Amino acid sequence: MLFGSLRINLWSGVVGFTLTFLLSLNSNLLTTSLIRGLIASAVWFLFAFAVRFVLGMLTQPEKPVSADPRVDRHAGQGEGLGSRLDLTTPDESEELNDLLNPMPDSEQLKSADFKPLDPPKLVTSKDPEELAKAVRHLTDK
């Protein structure tokens, strides 16, 4: 499945180490450049695995279903087990019609029990002079 050999990964790591070490040597200490080179070597090594995997998937020819040995072994049980998927949905037209057509008995029972909220009205029957006096008293403070 992987393209090439492990040598590609090793050479990729060496190239990553060399480039990073030489580019960071001008502005860093020798130990810092070595550490950064080793980290870059490991990253390039792992990146080469990903590149090899993608190249292996692209260059690998696709096998027909009949060439698969597992299918030939189970040929008596069925053709290409797992290669076909047949789905059907259940008929739900009756349930939809029941939802669209309301039941009159249940609605009448519900409407008989329902009583809208009737809160008491807040109407004051106080004298307007008293209200004006109260407002004047509150605005003075």
Image (cartoon, helix red, strand yellow):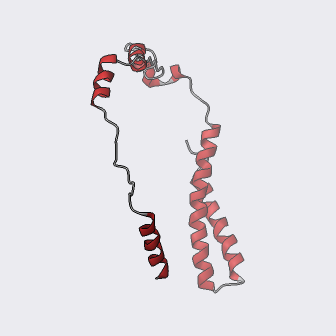
Q: Quadrant of the N terminus?
A: top right
Vertical relation: 62 (above or below) 101: below
Query: Which residue appears at 63% of the width and 85% of the height?
Result: 30
Task: Give coordinates of residue 15: x percent, y percent.
Answer: 67, 65
Task: Give coordinates of residue 68: x percent, y percent.
Answer: 49, 24
Q: How many marks?
A: 0
Q: In terms of depth relative to the viewer, which is nearer, 105 or 3?
A: 105
Q: Is residue 53 visible?
A: yes
Vertical relation: 135 (above or below) 53: below
User: Is 86 placed left or right of 116 in the picture?
Assistant: right
User: Is 45 placed left or right of 89 in the picture?
Assistant: right
Q: In terms of depth relative to the viewer, which is nearer, 137 or 55?
A: 137
**Quadrant assignment, res 13:** bottom right
Vertical relation: 121 (above or below) 16: above
Query: Which residue appears at 64% of the width and 44% of the height?
Result: 55
Query: Which residue appears at 46% of the width and 24% of the height?
Result: 69
Task: Give coordinates of residue 3: x percent, y percent.
Answer: 61, 45
Task: Give coordinates of residue 19: x percent, y percent.
Answer: 69, 70
